[in-house]
Image (cartoon, grey):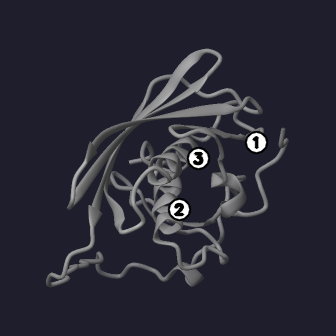
Amino acid sequence: MPSSVPRSFADLIALQQTDDDTFVGQTPDYPWGRVYGGQVVAQSLAAAAATVARDHFVHSLHAYFVLGGVPLEEISFEVDRLREGRSFTTRRVVARQSSGAILNLDASFQRIETDVEIQETNLPPDLPSPEALPETSWPGLGDVREIPHQPGSARSQMWMRIGSGLGDDPVVHACALAYLSDHNPMDA
């Protein structure tokens, strides 16, 4: 089994399919003594996506951490095909190790339909660019740049990205976002 963080994000989310709805993933030895939660979310999403038609893309997901994962122990991803619809498909994934379930994930996938695409972004004023900030030391995959905390503020801000090499697959991009989403939720 791997003993360090994989060299690429694709290696991290590469799963071995053991039957139609079961996959196995590896986990490195993180220095904090548990599996990184974002890794388990990303791998669970990859397992769910592997059971969905290629014309359906990630619409939403909800992840529930049950137990801390054990580094260097394989993780089994059991996919439950809840719904096969024309427009929407739904999956539930249970990630398991020898201690039992470590994560439950519910994911919805939607067939792309012609529609007006709108995305609004309201960045806070005076937000420094990522290049203006020092790189944060983090043993995970990705470039993390923390924006200094304002005294008394209950807000944590940062720029994050997986480095190069994600390719064009929208599933890989969704898994990368899921991976990074667990990096800093508690600092705020």
Is residue 159 something that shows in the picture? no
Q: Which residue is mark 2?
A: 176
Q: Is residue 177 above or below residue 3?
A: below
Question: What's the residue at 27%, 62% (across, down)?
Answer: 110
State how far apart marks 1 and 3 are (Cα).
Answer: 10 Å
Question: What's the residue at 53%, 62% (across, down)?
Answer: 176
Q: Is residue 179 above or below residue 121?
A: above
Q: In the image, which disc is placed on residue 28?
A: 1
Q: Position of residue 101 (x, y in %)?
A: 51, 22
Is residue 137 something that shows in the picture? yes
In the orientation shown, which residue stands out farthest toward the top?
99
Q: Which residue is mark 3?
A: 39
Task: Say which quarter of the image contains residue 135.
Answer: bottom right
Amino acid at pointer 2 = Ala
Q: Are marks 3 and 2 in contact (CB under 8 Å)?
A: no
Amino acid at pointer 3 = Gln
Which of the two discs, 1 and 3, labels the residue nearer the N terminus?
1
Q: Position of residue 154 (x, y in %)?
A: 32, 50
Task: Say which quarter of the image contains residue 33.
Answer: top right
Q: Position of residue 127 (x, y in %)?
A: 39, 78
**Would you call the spot at circle 1 few (<14 residues within 10 Å), some (14-19), or many (20 or more)?**
many
